[in-house]
Amino acid sequence: MTITRTRKIQVIHTLLRARDLRRLRRALERLDDVQIASQLDNLDYADQKQVLQLLTAERRPEIISSMREESAGPLLAQLAPQEAALLLDELEADDAVDILQHVGQSGLRKILEQLDKDDVDEIEELLAYDQNTAGGIMSPHYFRVAPEATVGDALAMIQAEEEPPDTAFHVYVVDDDDRIVGVCSLRTLVISLPGQTIRDVMERDVVHVSADTDQEEVADIVGRYDLVALPVVDAYGRMVGIVDVDDVVDVIREEATEDILKMAGAGEELAETRSFYGSLRARWRWLLAAAVGGTAAAMSLSGYDQALAQVPALALFMPVVAGMGGNVGMQSSTIIVRGLAVGFIETHRIKRIVLREVSLGVVMGLAYGLLIGSSSYLLHADVDALRLGFVVMMGTAGSMTIAAFVGTCTPLLLDRTGVDPAVATGPFVTTSVDVLGLLFYFWLASRLLGVGG
């Protein structure tokens, strides 16, 4: 099935290049909305508009909502305001807002002028929230009922709704001031007697978040409590919306992508890597840090030029000593960063985690150091092979131990000081590990081999 799907997607590229619109229209009919949306994400605006024009009016809104927001927003900005407004009018308010956040201010104003006043008020209210908070990703559409209502009243209200929310799994119980006092699942309503009051069948302990809660914390709460929807309240405790599980999935994907890119020093969003100048802007600071760190490493090792002159074989093992340390540092820091992100690492476990990672560095360092050091017998160096092998072994073990310690402690310290720990796995860890590991390696060589330094 995967192979078939891949071939279908490739057909769209081929037919667009060939300008065979008749066959392209037939191919689009055989693809589902998600497949088409994923293809549109990777086309330029001219091709996106052309494919959109070949689709029926009924399919366009769903395909737009299935696209990545970073692609759908600029695409809407290229359309006529009336056409863009027609597409957004068919979407849920939270989906429309997610897309409009990637439309320029001038284009946003023109599109909003084409929408109904009620829709505009709803969209502008959601746009007022930070896009990375619960308020920015919530949906204002949900079922609400008073605690004095009966089960029969609640079911009648749900059945009378002309356009029920797409993810309506619960009915939220609110008082006269719109403060949430309970929740009822649809299953509870169906199996309860029509004459029972909502107060008697509702769950009173309702997990909720405030509108300014960070989206990453929202995703963590949904995952911990196994929720399909999470109520959102304002500063006065009044319920203003819900975060659906489909939005949480998007958040998890975005946060994971952001952490990966930060650890690589390549920005925070994939959209930043789409253009030359965007990539340059996202990466130059990290590359500058790596360049400064590399220069510092070269200067710190300049005092060991006599050691290299007397035992040139030491230089042959420099890449493997630094490389093994860098890999261990990256492994340790990645584990810690991800553990902090998902709440796996707690304060009382920090000492044990540091001890475990350093112990792993020692054990693996000795094992691989023995393996690497034994290769010194294959070299015809002007120094005792046994002593050279011992220096390489202990140098590798020391480098990997230092790397494990630095890679573990750096993100923990950054997290403690309020700095995003994802940046710890960039040039800082790599450079510091290289400098400290090689300094230890040459210090050991100067002591055990009796060379200058």
Image (spheres, rainbow, N blue to C red):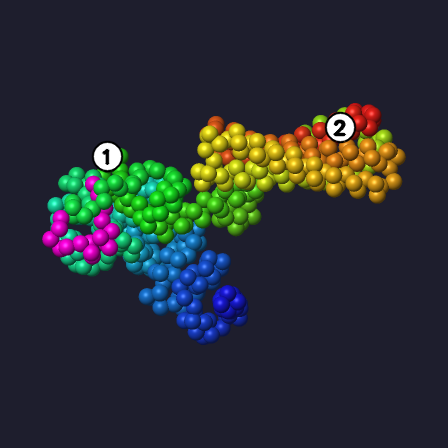
Horizontal relation, residue 247 to residue 325: left or right: left
Q: Is residue 291 above or below residue 378?
A: above
At a point 35% along the width and 61% down the height, the residue shown is: 62
Residue 401 x/y as whole percent: 65, 33
| Residue span colored magenta | 181-197
Q: Which residue bears the numbered disc 1?
A: 236
Q: Which residue bears the numbered disc 2?
A: 444
Can residue 166 be seen by looking at this rendering? yes
- Determine if the magenta segment contains residue 193: yes
Q: CA distance from mark 1 to mark 2?
A: 64 Å
Identify which amino acid the numbered label 2 is placed on: Leu
Residue 17 x/y as whole percent: 53, 67
Horizontal relation, residue 309 to residue 44: left or right: right
Identify which amino acid the numbered label 1 is placed on: Tyr
Horizontal relation, residue 188 to residue 317: left or right: left
At a point 70% along the width and 39% down the height, the residue shown is: 367
Query: Disc 1 vs disc 2: Cβ atoms closer than 8 Å?
Result: no
Would you call the spot at circle 2 few (<14 residues within 10 Å), some (14-19), or many (20 or more)? Answer: some
- Determine if the magenta segment contains residue 62: no
Nearer to me, 219 or 60: 219
Residue 430 x/y as whole percent: 62, 36
Does label 1 or label 2 sit earlier along the sequence?
A: 1
Q: Nearer the viewer, mark 1 or mark 2?
A: 2
